[in-house]
């Protein structure tokens, strides 16, 4: 409703694409195909573990497409997995892959691994989203769009008053944890 009050020629949708009536500018990321492609690429490594657990709260604002893709991935690859609403502190176990979009859960998993002597990438796997320097330094495998590029493209589009309909690709950053 609020978005409908903004003239389409002055509107730039940024980050997550949401369908609206009419033509409008957007620089966004895509979740379905890119997430499936990344999971597909990781399937041989994921198979080395007993199961993959994806943490996703039904109440979160995280993309619902990732839940659909995760279920499709499990079915197509015949991999054991489940979706839980949240990570419970202290519940990390060897033989599992943990996939989370929530940084708080990620850091709790890492902390629990350290406390239990579980080695990420060896005893357990970890996959996160939205790459950032700390994840790169620690060696966490991530699935992320290039937010720097997204911001630069948005700035260029605004400064040059150009029409833009662009999807910034999501990339799998393979590191030590998976």
Image (spheres, grey):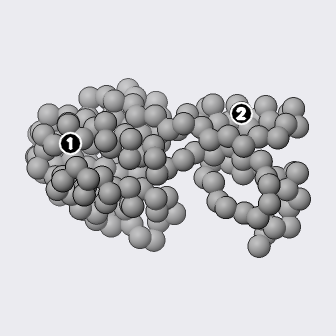
Q: x, y (%) of residue 8?
A: 85, 56
Front one among 83 and 47? 47
Q: CA distance from mark 2 to mark 1?
A: 34 Å
The quarter of the image holding the C terminus is: top left
Res. 155 visible in picture: yes
Res. 53 visible in picture: no
Which of the labelled discs sits on residue 121, or is there none?
none
Q: Residue at x 72, y 51 (%)?
A: 13
Say which quarter of the image contains residue 5: bottom right
Which of the labelled discs sits on residue 153, or is there none?
2
Sequence order check, earlier mark of 2 and 1: 1
Q: How many marks?
A: 2
Front one among 93 and 74? 74
Q: Which residue is mark 1?
A: 46
Classify 81 as above or below 5.
above
Which class describes the residues within 10 Å of circle 2: few (<14), some (14-19), or many (20+)? some
Could you tell whether 41 is left or right of 45 in the image? right
Q: Residue at x 88, y 37 (%)?
A: 161
Q: Residue at x 54, y 36 (%)?
A: 169
Q: x, y (%) of residue 7?
A: 89, 59
Could you tell whether 101 is left or right of 12 in the image? left
Q: Secondary structure at mark 2?
A: helix
Q: Secondary structure at mark 1?
A: helix
Say which quarter of the image contains residue 37: top left
Front one among 14 and 168? 168
Q: Residue at x 31, y 36 (%)?
A: 41
Q: x, y (%) of residue 98?
A: 25, 49
Q: x, y (%) of residue 108?
A: 29, 50
């Amino acid at each position: 409703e609020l978005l409908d009050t903004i003239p389409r020629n002055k509107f730039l949708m940024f980050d997550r694409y949401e369908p609206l009536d009419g033509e409008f500018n957007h620089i966004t990321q895509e979740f379905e195909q890119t997430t499936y492609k990344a999971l597909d690429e990781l399937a041989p490594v994921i198979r080395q573990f007993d199961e993959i657990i994806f943490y996703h709260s039904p109440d979160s604002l995280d993309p619902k497409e990732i839940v659909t893709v995760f279920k499709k991935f499990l079915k197509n690859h015949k991999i054991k997995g489940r979706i839980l609403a949240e990570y419970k502190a202290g519940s990390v176990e060897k033989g599992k892959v943990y996939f989370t979009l929530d940084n708080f859960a990620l850091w709790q998993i890492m902390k629990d691994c350290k406390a239990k002597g579980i080695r990420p990438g060896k005893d357990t796997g970890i996959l996160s989203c939205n790459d950032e320097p700390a994840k790169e330094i620690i060696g966490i495998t991530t699935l992320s769009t290039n937010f720097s590029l997204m911001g630069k493209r948005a700035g260029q589009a605004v400064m040059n008053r150009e029409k833009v309909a662009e999807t910034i690709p999501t990339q799998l950053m393979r590191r030590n944890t998976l």
